[in-house]
Image: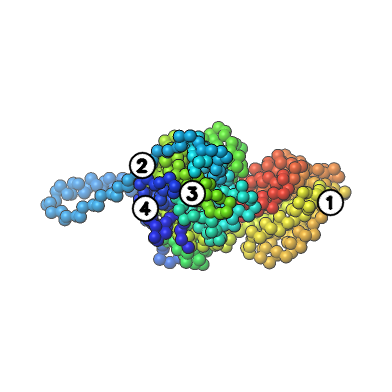
Amino acid sequence: MRDQTRGDEDAPGPRRGQSFQPETAAVPAASPPALSPTLSSTASSAAPAKPAAPSAIDERRERRRKRRRRMVMWTTVVGIVVLVGSISTVSYAIVSNLAEPEPAAEEPAAAPPAVVEAIEFPQDEPAAAAGAQPCATVSVLSSFENAEMVESLAAAYNSQPRNVAGSCVTVTTAKEKSGLAAAVVATGFPNLGAEQKPTVWLPDSSTWVDVAQSQGATNLRADGTSVAISDVVIAMPETLAEAIGWDAAAPTWNDIFQAAGDPDLWSGLGHPEWGAFKLGKTSPLMATSGEAAMYASYGTAAGSLADLTAAQVQDPTVQAEVHENETATSHYMATPEHFLWHARQAEASGSTADFLSAVIVDEKSVWDYNRGITSRDGITRTQGEPPSEQLVPIYPTDGYYSADNPVMRLTGEWIDPVEAEAAADFIRFTHTAQGQSAVRAAGYRDLNRALDEGVADVGQLDAAQQGTLAFPAADVVTAVQASFPEVRKRANVLFLLDVSGSMDEPIPAGDTKLTQARKAIEAALGHFTTGDDVGLAAFAQGPDGAMLPGLVAPVSDIGGSRDTFLGALGGLTSMGDTPLYQAVDTFAAQQAASWTSDHINAIVLLSDGENDTPNAPTIGADQMLANLKDMHHATPVLIFTLAYGADADVATLQSISSATGAHYYDATDPSKLQAVLGDLVTSF
């Protein structure tokens, strides 16, 4: 398969995995500039050598315990080394002056460093007057992560008159999670009408082009080109980065995975109040930062980040080590915004360290966070006061990946020739001085890797970083995606379903709320595989005040219990009232009793109403939340809440998820339940 964003064998530009020099020549407006989207202009740093013999899992755990002690001594050792080095230098100078001089051997002159010529961005050339109406529409589909940048580019383009083939031009934007966007690109946008389908796709990483092609995409032109860069970094609260020393001397990826796997690290460094090291990652099936984390994990396990192959990804020994790394993940989320929103919530109620120690995100997300912008859902952004605990970006010394934001023209019968030409003109604009200015103002590096000074200052970003690794080849990308269900951290999950009488309410699709919920849970069950422990409970209050029906499918390995689960799900009927607080308190305690550190311990709570217990009093909301917060410190059970239907108690459901460090999902429109629940289970 040809790499659509990097040039084919018969076209200029480097292949994937090669470093490159950016093109500097101007390109006619009718076609995009032939710039490679792999944006590192320097060779990647050397990767750590693979040990002679792979360590067994128990040996790796022992090394992790020793790691804590090494970190305690780190600063002292560095100081000693510097002192000894200084003494040695002085001693050498004295001895050299006393000894007979010897002719120095001639050493070959060092090669001068390669000079990378910066791109000179051409000026935009808008039309003297706008073309005739109706305007040609260029609809651009972006990722959630780069949506703000794409909106800025569209606004800058639309601010000047455009005339393409006699028509004016309007650029519009839409956004979707990267993994979901790749899927709909591959299938040709089957659920959209011709007027709604995009003309251009601008994911935040070219790896999603590989994913779309692996899923059968045939509607992507071969002239994709990068627009902007955002390095993928380890973001940490400042105090935590200082405590571990990574603010002064950046770690390798192996250091990061070792630290995340050491449950005693913070207590060994004098901070038991921070608990275990909590490493946050997005799902590699949904977001580029999650992909980058997996490439780093596989590269570390295989012995080279720069030369990772599909065969190594499929090696059981390598996969075993990657799985061990994944067990240190607190849980997965769909977008970086999810993690950072929870970090702000944790700061507001105590300390950011209560929720995360480090999270793998792009630079732009760090800038957003430090200037007070958060988003609960990745769609609606909120500007607040900057956090008191700022994040610092850590750039691993053995290299890091960069989101390269390729702009891809689409083909299809819904795109007429004028729209296609208008799309090319918009892409031309993205590489002009005005377009690249919009890129920098939106928090990204331009194609010369330059950052806006204000962005760099607020985000504490290192403008001079040169450690970018090329993304792996397309076959490695798809191999990593295929392997994730096997290597990810396993789940210990209870689906908790409200079956009160209101679940009999009909919904527009012709189902009742309950039948629609059963269908959605059955579809979500497909996400889980052997090794995941999954169970089902339901709750309503009977006439005698008892909570019914309770646990209907015990939490057990879904590899052998799927039929039992589905049978219990199909047998649920609606009844009685809604003991929401009692159900949450009861089943959270049961899940905590079976808590295990190598699983994501969680409840998926789906309810369509407020707490309503007329037949017998139950625990109150305040006591329920207090119990959840107490439990969270020792045996944390994440309770993902899903508000189902317009009558759901949104405020209470949000408070439940927040108390446990999990996420709230909105399905108050019942027709969206299956999609929302499908999004939710990417957290596992």
Mark 4, residue position = 20
Mark 2, residue position = 120
Question: Which x, y percent locates residue 145?
Answer: 53, 45
Total marks drawn?
4
Give the CA separation, mark 2 to mark 4: 16 Å
- The tag on residue 407 is 3
Residue positioned 61% across, 53% down in the render: 189
Callout 3 touching callout 4 (CB < 8 Å): no
Residue positioned 40% across, 46% down in the render: 28
**Residue 118 or residue 323, whichever sits in front:** 118
- The tag on residue 421 is none
Q: Nearer the viewer, mark 4 or mark 1?
A: 4
Which badge, 3 or 1, is on the more N-terminal residue?
Answer: 3
Which badge, 4 or 1, is on the more N-terminal residue?
Answer: 4
Quadrant (top left/top right/bottom left/bottom right) for the C terminus: bottom right
Give the CA separation, mark 3 to mark 1: 53 Å
Q: Secondary structure at mark 1?
A: loop
Give the CA separation, mark 2 to mark 1: 70 Å
